[in-house]
Image (cartoon, helix red, strand yellow):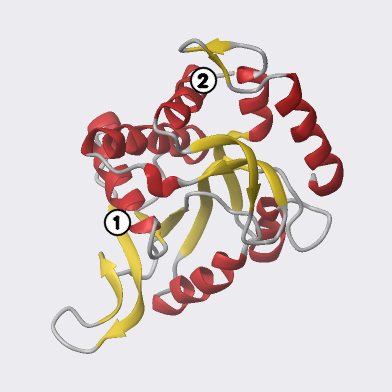
Amino acid sequence: MENYKKEFIEFMVDCQVLKFGEFILKSGRKSPFFMNAGAYVTGAQLRKLGEYYAKAIHAHYGDDFDVLFGPAYKGIPLSVATTMAYSELYGKEIRYCSNRKEAKDHGDAGILLGSKLKDGDKVVIIEDVTTSGKSMEETVPIIRAQADIQIKGLMVSLNRMEKGKGDKSALEEIKELYGFDTNAIVSMADVTEYLYNKPYHGNIYINDEIKAAIDSYYAQYGA
């Protein structure tokens, strides 16, 4: 496992973004883990988060893209932080772009925040986590309606590795439906491998009981 992945797992735990226990998801599923990107709230946390996204995007998509698109609302700070990190780490200026939930009809009018999309632009979409793929149903048509662009791929922070609408994972379903690549900084398999019965800051975050609950969850919902 790459070092940035190990560091990112520790970072999620430190920021209390990734928690273990018993959680009811929006889908109604009872999950033994929960990831909440809304817990990244400080400048230092957002700076580090942008760096991890930038490293993962660079590893999977290289430098051959022009725009980072972050769907409203959580994708807005993600896209801003990551374009800044990308400039610092790799010396390339990537434009950020996000959508508004409602189009603005005065001043900086339209549905988009940040950079406008232009014909020929290559776009990477950035999100926190994708469980069902529902957000892409809104996001992809918005992006493709703006200009003749190419979507290079999607990057999320955590691949939950569970079924979307069918038997495949949400990331696999998005890839098949829209025809672009999908990746994550880390997967739950990475998280489980790294934290299982391993002390971190004096705590065992995935002990035998939590591991059994995770295994049971994936027996039912795993892709």
**Image spot of residue 6 (x, y percent):** 51, 20
What residue is drawn where x is 80% and y is 40%?
Answer: 218
| Number of on-image labels | 2
The structure residue drawn at horizontal position 73% and vertical position 47%, both measured from the top left corner, is 162
Task: From the image, tell me which residue sits under label 2.
Answer: 6
Residue 70, percent from left and from top: 39, 58
Q: Which quadrant would residue 133 be assigned to in this image?
A: bottom right
Most foreground residue, 13 or 223: 13
Q: Secondary structure at mark 1?
A: strand
Marks 1/2: CA distance? 27 Å
In the image, 58: left or right of 18? Answer: left
Residue at (56% x, 10% y) in the render = 199
Q: Is residue 124 something that shows in the picture?
A: yes
Q: Position of residue 217 (x, y in %)?
A: 79, 41
Which residue lies under the disc numbered 1?
96
Q: How many neighbours does mark 1 have within 10 angstroms: few (below 14), some (14-19), or many (20 or more)?
A: many
Which residue is drawn at the image coordinates 39% and 65% (left, top)? 72
Is residue 223 visible from the viewing direction of this image? no
Q: Earlier in the sequence, mark 1 or mark 2?
A: 2
Question: On the rendered structure, is 83 left or right of 223?
Answer: left
Amino acid type shown at disc 1? Tyr
Callout 2 crowding tier (Cα within 10 Å): few <14, some 14–19, many ≥20 = some
